[in-house]
Image (tube, rainbow, N blue to C red):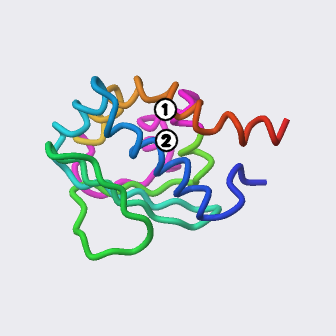
Amino acid sequence: MSYFTDASEVYRYLGGVFRAANDEPTAGAALKDADIILRLDYTNPDSSITVTLKPEGIEVIEGENDLVPDVRLAMSADNGNKFWRGEYNVAVGLAKGQVKAKGSVSKILKLIPISKPLFPIYKNLVAEKDAQHS
């Protein structure tokens, strides 16, 4: 069974970590400096998040939109959840075919270490959900 019950939970938690990054001085600033549009397509449940990582701020757009991403990743929502917990290596996922990428893989790989300081923020976001499942 998937960790997320529906797309609204994916948006709340996996989108939420990017919203929280906007106010995070270290990782947030580094993500803004990436100056790219990232699209994340998840399965189980099906959902899409487009994140504009721009110097003026991070914006999260839920669902379909007309923005053309610089980088597009597709993976299960469970692997997205595991990544933000620090339990999933996206580079290994790419190598195994569990993660599909379009666009600059080098840009993706540069974002990963920048994202690590956000792991505790994500764990705080899902703490209440985790408590309900234990």
Q: CA distance from mark 2 to mark 1?
A: 6 Å
The image shows residue 114 at horizontal and vertical percentages of 31, 28
- Please indicate whether residue 120 sits to the left or right of residue 24 in the image: right
**Residue beneath the point at 68% across and 54% down:** 4
Q: What stretch of residues is rendered in magenta?
A: 82-106
Q: Residue at x 33, y 74 (%)?
A: 65
Q: Quadrant of residue 126?
A: top right
Q: Are marks 2 and 1 in contact (CB under 8 Å)?
A: yes
Q: x%, y% of residue 52? A: 26, 54
What residue do we see at 52% from left, 59% from top? Answer: 42
Q: Quadrant of the N terminus?
A: bottom right
Please tell me the numbered disc located at residue 89. Answer: 1
Query: Observer-nearest residue: 113 or 130?
Result: 130
Q: Is residue 83 magenta?
A: yes
Q: Secondary structure at mark 2?
A: helix
**Residue sitting nearer the eye, 117 or 25:** 25
Q: Which residue bears the numbered disc 2?
A: 93
In the image, what residue type sits under mark 1?
A: Asn
| 111 relative position to 82: left or right | left
Please name the amino acid that badge 2 sits on.
Answer: Gly
